[in-house]
């Protein structure tokens, strides 16, 4: 009897709400799926990283640079260091005098011309003439640069360094640079009747040896592009006469 009285005193649990059933014939709405990608489509490529900056010129000054500025004034253009190489740019008009000063000065006497070469810039119709000098006494090196227009002559420095004799002949042979007062300006690598200057950037490499090989060896060159086709494309193409 006590247990029945205890049970009768417990509160009743509230009835759970009934879930409304969908009306007959209506299905539960489905979540729409994204459309499939078109066949053969590739995912977008990730954005390219920013291009890293290349080496930059750094200012360079020294007692030698100051001496050049003082002596040659307006002939001096600028001095800088690039990838650890000290460089001086000057105008071309007094190049032999400047080179004589660099050889004989007491600050850093550059008694050896290591190399002389050129860079062709056809868009601006210019050549950059580059001299690499070395001082045995100071164990230092410097690059001296100057610019000339195409077919504009420049003074030879063969009177300053005898090594310039052969080096300038090579620049003439490969680029066509004309040196004033050179003792023997003629080709040094190619035959005298070779046409053109192979290291100029506007030189057509496919034509470089076609006619010379025909003329001197009596055979066709290994090039697949022949003189007749060259003349058809460029009426100004000049070759030595047979």
Image: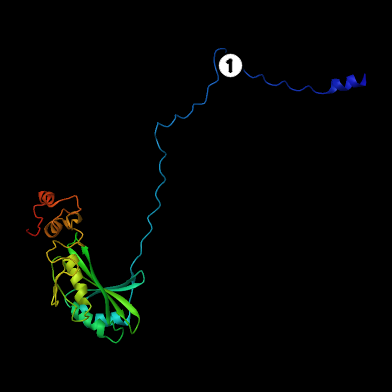
- Disc 1 is placed on an element classified as loop
Q: Residue furthest top?
A: 24
Residue 101 lies, in percent from the top left, at: 23, 83
As drawn, 217 above or below 152: above
Split into 4 quadrants, where in the image is the C terminus? bottom left
Characterize the local packing of mark 1: few (<14), some (14-19) or many (20 or more) Cα atoms within 10 angstroms: few
Q: How many marks?
A: 1
Res 170 seen here? yes
- Quadrant in the rendering for residue 141: bottom left
In what quadrant of the picture does the N terminus appear?
top right
Q: Which residue is located at x 30 percent, y 76 percent?
A: 142
Nearer to the camera, 77 or 107: 107
Along the viewing direction, whichever of 223 and 23 lies nearer the viewer:
223
Front residue (pair 154, 158) = 158
Side of 4 where 142 appears, left or right: left
Residue 100: % across, % down = 22, 82
The spot of residue 207 in percent (x, y) is 17, 55
According to the picture, the residue beneath numbered tag 1 turns out to be 22
- Comparing 227 with 96, the one in front is 227
Location of residue 165 with respect to 47 vertically, above or below: below
* Residue 147 shows in this picture: no
Reply above or below: 224 against 59.
above
- Residue 161 placement (x, y as % from top left): 22, 80
Farthest bottom residue in view: 106
Q: Residue furthest right?
A: 1
Q: Quadrant of residue 131?
A: bottom left
Which residue occupies the extreme left position in the image?
A: 241
Quarter of the view holding residue 55: bottom left
Image height of 12 relative to 74, above or below: above
In the displayed structure image, the side of residue 139 where residue 129 appears, left or right: left
């Amino acid at each position: 009897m006590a247990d029945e009285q205890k049970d009768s005193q417990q509160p009743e649990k509230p009835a759970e709400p009934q879930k409304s059933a969908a009306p007959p014939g209506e299905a539960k709405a489905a979540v729409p799926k994204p459309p499939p990608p078109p066949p053969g489509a590739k995912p977008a490529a990730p954005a390219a990283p920013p291009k890293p900056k290349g080496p930059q010129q750094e200012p360079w000054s020294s007692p030698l640079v100051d001496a050049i500025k003082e002596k040659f004034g307006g002939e001096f253009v600028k001095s800088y260091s690039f990838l650890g190489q000290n460089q001086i740019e000057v105008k071309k008009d007094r190049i032999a005098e400047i080179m004589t000063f660099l050889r004989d000065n007491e600050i850093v006497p550059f008694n050896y011309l290591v190399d002389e070469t050129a860079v062709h810039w056809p868009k601006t119709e210019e050549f950059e003439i580059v001299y690499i000098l070395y001082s045995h006494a100071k164990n230092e090196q410097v690059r001296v640069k100057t610019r000339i227009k195409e077919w504009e002559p420049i003074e030879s420095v063969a009177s300053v360094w005898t090594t310039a004799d052969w080096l300038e002949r090579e620049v003439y042979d490969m680029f066509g640079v004309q040196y004033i007062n050179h003792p023997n300006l003629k080709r040094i690598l190619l035959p005298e009747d070779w046409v053109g200057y192979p290291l100029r950037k506007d030189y057509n490499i496919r034509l470089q040896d076609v006619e010379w090989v025909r003329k001197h060896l009596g055979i066709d060159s290994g090039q697949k592009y022949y003189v007749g086709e060259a003349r058809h494309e460029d009426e100004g193409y000049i070759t030595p006469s047979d």
